[in-house]
Image (cartoon, rainbow, N blue to C red):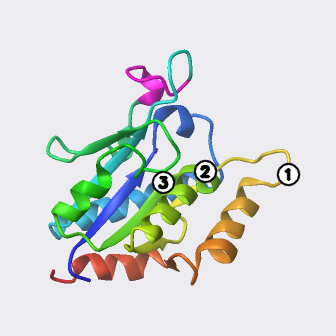
Amino acid sequence: MRNIVLLVVDVQNALINEHPYNEEKVIENIRQLISTARDNKKEVLYVRHDDGKGTELEKGIDGWQIYSKIAPNENELIFEKKYNSAFHKTGLKEYLDRNEIDTIILVGLQTEYCIDATCKSAFDHDYKIIIPEETNTTFDNDYLSGEKLYEFYNYKIWNKRFTEVISVEEVKKLLTMPT
């Protein structure tokens, strides 16, 4: 791993206010990873979703804002998106390539939508992807609980196919390694 970033996707007020599965643990784990990354001079990048006018994720309204417990510092970049993938029409890939980033630690919401699309897009672009356990989440739907969706994607779809799903403690160690 030459260069590593922590990519925080769609941890926005409107989604957190709906109380996704394992919400408190996920936020705490993300908060710890952000703190470790910053303490070790590793870049933290944010992605924020705009779902359009009249939605709970409309640009500029409170629901669209990044959740305060994990909010970016003034100098940290936010990539704005309108699609599930953090790579589609955002400039993220160009930024990562320009800065010779080869490894992405991926966290955020929602497991089966934007995290899945971002994970697979990153894989297609030849980045090494790491997903720390209990750092992505989602909601119950008509077919599966948020817990089952989390388990299915993390351990059946992604792990050892598109990414490595490893413990938060292991990821903290990676973040403390010199570049």
In the rendered structure, which amino acid carries the disc numbered 3?
A: Gly
Numbered label attached to residue 143: 1
Residue at the disc numbered 3: 108
Marks 2 and 3 close (CB-CB < 8 Å): no
Q: Is residue 93 above or below residue 168?
A: above
Camera-side residue: 48 or 167?
A: 48
Going by the numbered disc 2, the residue's amino acid type is Tyr
Which one is earlier in the sequence, the residue at label 2 or at label 3?
Answer: 3
Disc 1 element: loop
Q: Which residues are magenta?
A: 56-64
Q: Secondary structure at mark 2?
A: helix
Binning the other alpha carbons within 10 Å of mark 3 as few (below 14), some (14 to 19) or many (20 upward) gives many
Q: CA distance from mark 2 to mark 3?
A: 11 Å
Q: Counting residues from the N terminus, which is met first, the one under dot 3 or under dot 1?
A: 3
Q: Is residue 59 magenta?
A: yes
Give the position of the N terminus as an image quadrant: bottom left
**Residue 99 within the segment the image draws in magenta:** no
Residue topped by disc 2: 113
Q: CA distance from mark 3 to mark 1?
A: 21 Å
**Residue occupying image coordinates x 85% and y 45%:** 142
Q: Quadrant of residue 160?
A: bottom right
In the picture, which quadrant includes the C terminus? bottom left
